[in-house]
Image: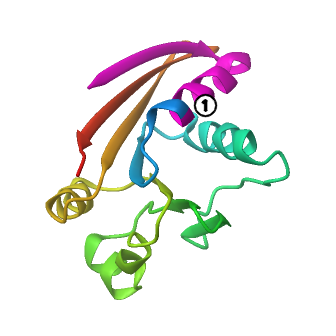
Amino acid sequence: MTKTIEATLPEVDSVASCLLGLLPKDAIIFLDGDLAAGKTTLMRHIAQKIDPNFEVTSPTFSLQNCYSEHLFHYDLYRVEFADIAALGLLEEFEKSGWHFVEWGDDRLKEFLEGLGYNIWIINIKPLGDTKRLYTIEEICTN
């Protein structure tokens, strides 16, 4: 399944609502896009749809933010696959819930897909300064 949505920044809430209705209960969702494409912004809107009190920031230095026992956010910029395993992050994906991953590489995607996890990819592409194209793709469901 592939779905595309064009949205301006004020419309990101509707993208978040769509995702909340689309994603299965347990999934690993890779947020793909260039620097400043809006990955963390989308994550913020999703989290705040679940609980308006969530303060969402990019986990650039901590690698992972847990917003609840079922909502996780990772930033793996410049983190190699071997480092993910060495840091014990692979075990985190066993937890029930939604795992949103920024900057996850193809090796990690393939590894998790091979283990049978529900894998989704959301590619965010800027369309000028005010609009984004969100391509939502279901890769693997168990």
The image shows residue 131, relative to residue 46, as above or below, that is: above
Viewer-proximal residue, 61 or 96? 96
Name, please, the residue furthest toward the left. 114
Residue 92 relative to residue 16: left or right: left
Residue 73, image x, y percentages:
56, 59
> Can I make out residue 7 in this image?
yes
Query: The N terminus is located in which quarter?
Result: top left
Residue 29, image x, y percentages:
41, 48
Residue identified by numbered label 1: 16
Circle 1 — which element?
helix
Report which quarter residue 24 is drawn in: top left
The image shows residue 125, relative to residue 117, as above or below, that is: above
Residue 11 relative to residue 63: left or right: right
The image shows residue 100, relative to residue 44, as above or below, that is: below
- The amino acid on which the numbered mark 1 sits, given as a three-letter code, is Ala
Q: Residue visible at 47% across and 66% down?
A: 96
Residue 114 relative to residue 90: left or right: left
Report which quarter residue 114 is drawn in: bottom left
Residue 15 among those drawn in magenta: yes
Boundaries of the magenta span: 1-20
The image shows residue 88, relative to residue 101, as above or below, that is: below
Residue 111 among those drawn in magenta: no
